Amino acid sequence: MRVWILLIMLSSLFREDLHGRVVGISDGDTFTLLTEEHAQVKVRLHGIDAPEKGQEFGQAAKKALSGLIYGHTVVVTGKGKDRYGRTIGMVFVDDRNINEEMLRLGMAWHYLKYDKDPRWDAFERIAREARTGLWSQADPMAPWEWRAARRVARSDLTP
């Protein structure tokens, strides 16, 4: 019993609900939140991966996220921090789940490495089949593959 209580207490240390206004959009899955306490927090949307800025559809994904949340008051249900110190979270405007909306719009991949929700697979599949957003491309490259290819290209340039 004590172990369960300890686990619940520890998990609550990594969960935080943040409330605030979105004041900046970095890309299709990352933004800056100005909290009610006037702190700026970088937030990365949990469970999705949008095209990178230099990647095809990267700017479209950034614009889509901006249209959904920029200037709005949001609630972020934190799921921890990533290696860059960003808060990973589920993002809501009113009752609208923005992570899911980006999948429905075809502006992101369901990031199965970090999320296993079968509904999110369905959202991505429906967008793919309808050739919505990035799925209108003949052969879209997943952002994690694009980042890996860039790392390999950079390492090939290093003497």
Image (cartoon, rainbow, N blue to C red):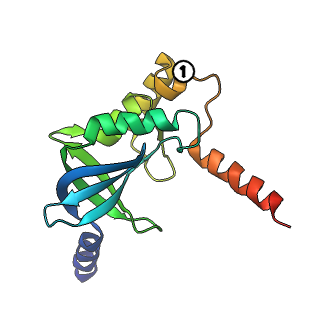
Q: Is residue 127 left or right of residue 149?
A: left
- Work out whether 7 lies above or below 88: below
* Quarter of the image with the N terminus in it: bottom left
Residue pointed to by mark 1:
136
Kindly state the secondary structure of the residue where label 1 is placed. helix
Amino acid at circle 1 = Ser
Between 112 and 92, which is closer to the camera in this rendering? 92
Q: Which residue occupies 43% across, 42% down?
A: 28
Residue 142, given in percent of the width and then of the height, sits at 59, 40
Q: Which residue shows up at 46% across the image and 21% down it?
A: 132
Where 78 sits versus 135, above or below? Answer: below
Local crowd at mark 1 within 10 Å, few (<14), some, or many (≥20)?
A: some
Q: Quadrant of residue 104?
A: top left
The percent position of residue 94, horizontal first and vertical second, equals: 14, 40
Image position of 131 (left or right of 62): right
Q: Is residue 146 above or below residue 120?
A: below
Q: Nearer the viewer, residue 112 or 40?
A: 40
